[in-house]
Image: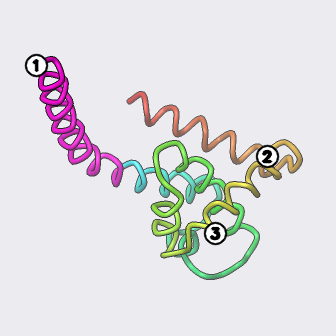
Amino acid sequence: MKDKQVIEELRGIEKQIADLRFRLSDNKQRYLGRLAEIICEVFNITEEQLTGPERNPEYTDARFAFSFFARKHFTWKEIGEALGDRDHSTAKYQHTRYLELHGTDLVFTQKADQVQAKITEYEYE
């Protein structure tokens, strides 16, 4: 009898999780959009440049930051898709490059810190 109770409780929890996932999906898209806006503002580029194919250092640095900050809430696949349908491995590489540059490249670090401050502001609005 106890096993049946546990199974029913688990089914109830699964339904609650499915409901939360559905409600969060809209919030996740808004978060991605706001993150892109913040990145573009700080790095002084357009969303087209952020998601486009060009490899200009200003654009790639912005993509590194986007991948790093998006990783808090998103999978590699979701990040790659948000950055112009890139592969998940590209998003993972961009995250790694962020870690390599942050702390060693002063200009990049300052911009990344500005992004972090704006994200924190946004998350607590």
Q: Residue placed at 65% from the left, 53% from the top?
A: 65
Q: Earlier in the sequence, mark 3 or mark 1?
A: 1
* Above or below: residue 123 compared with residue 82: above
User: Which residue type carries mark 1?
Assistant: Met
Q: CA distance from mark 3 to mark 2?
A: 18 Å
Q: Residue placed at 52% from the left, 67% from the top?
A: 80
Majority SS type along the magenta span: helix
Tell which residue pokes out farthest to the front in this image: 1
Callout 2: helix, strand or loop? loop
Callout 3: helix, strand or loop? helix
Mark nearest the camera among 1 and 2 is 1
- Look at mark 1 in the image and give the residue it sits on: 1
Tell which residue pokes out farthest to the right in this image: 104
Local crowd size for mark 2, using a 10 Å CA cut-off: few (<14), some (14–19), many (≥20) = some
In which image quadrant can residue 40 be found? bottom right
Residue 62 visible from this viewpoint: no
Q: Earlier in the sequence, mark 3 or mark 2?
A: 3
Q: Quadrant of the C terminus?
A: top left
Residue 27 visible from this viewpoint: yes
User: Which residue type carries mark 3?
Assistant: Thr
- Look at mark 3 in the image and give the residue it sits on: 90
Q: Position of residue 112 (x, y in %)?
A: 69, 46
* Above or below: residue 48 compared with residue 13: below
* Contact check, label 1 and label 2, Cβ < 8 Å: no
Which residue is at the front of the view, 9 or 38? Answer: 9
In which image quadrant can residue 59 be found? bottom right
- Look at mark 2 in the image and give the residue it sits on: 102
Magenta segment, which residues? 1-30
Q: CA distance from mark 1 to mark 2?
A: 56 Å
